[in-house]
Image: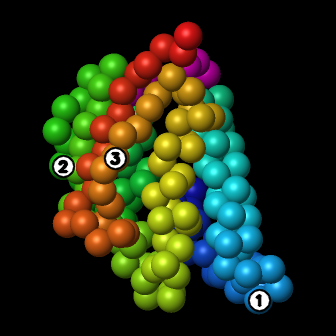
Amino acid sequence: MKLPIIERRRIEALILKNVYDALEKSHGKQVAVATIDAAVSRAAAAFGEEHRNELGRTPDLADLAAILPNWSADDALRIEIVEARADRLDFNVTRCRYAEMYREMGLGDIGHILSCNRDGQFCTGYNPDMKLDRSQTIMQGASHCDFRYKLEKRS
């Protein structure tokens, strides 16, 4: 049985919190943030590549929509779909238990690095032609997260 993603993120955060604290103490906040951001970004791209490989072809946005339940399992996210096509996926997250969890763990100030920044990086491994535009997140105080994905062919 696969572990729900929110549980994976909780376990990762327990470890990363200690790494972050040690780095901040030895090298300062800027280095700690940059290091955690780089590590999480690499992990997110690898997670995207893993999903692409499981699919066995280059995914489109209908494929991304089909795997959204992986992130919302256990009521981790409440999602309202605005538009869903093969070349466009727009949705709003109206509740984010990831943000709630990171705040409860005392990681609210880097929660965007541990969670939100993964979303665009996931595309790097999943399908580099996928682009995410998001102007706000619950993690950083907004009422909802506005995910706007599109496919853009690279030149």
Q: Quadrant of residue 12?
A: bottom right
Look at the numbered disc 2 and give the secondary structure of its residue.
strand
Magenta stretch containing residue 116, yes or no?
no
Place of residue 89 in the rendered image (x, y in percent of width and height, measured from the top left): 29, 32
Q: On the rendered structure, is 17 left or right of 95?
A: right
* Image quarter (top left, top right, bottom left or bottom right) of the N terminus: bottom right
Q: CA distance from mark 2 to mark 3?
A: 15 Å
**Magenta region, main secondary structure:** loop
Q: Amino acid at mark 3?
A: Arg
Q: CA distance from mark 1 to mark 2?
A: 41 Å
The magenta region covers 56-63
Query: What residue is drawn where x is 83% and y is 85%?
Result: 26
Pointer 3 residue? 134
The earlier-in-sequence mark between 2 and 3 is 2
Place of residue 155 in the rendered image (x, y in percent of width and height, measured from the top left): 56, 10
Q: On the rendered structure, is 77 left or right of 44?
A: left
Query: What residue is drawn where x is 73% and y is 71%?
Result: 31
Instruction: Say which mark, if any, is on residue 25.
Output: 1
Pointer 2 residue? 80
Front residue of 18/77: it is 18
Front residue of 41/68: it is 41
Q: Quadrant of residue 131?
A: top left
Look at the numbered disc 3 and give the secondary structure of its residue.
loop
Other residues around mark 3 within 10 Å, as few (<14) / some (14–19) / many (≥20): some
Report the mark closest to the observer, 2 or 3: 3
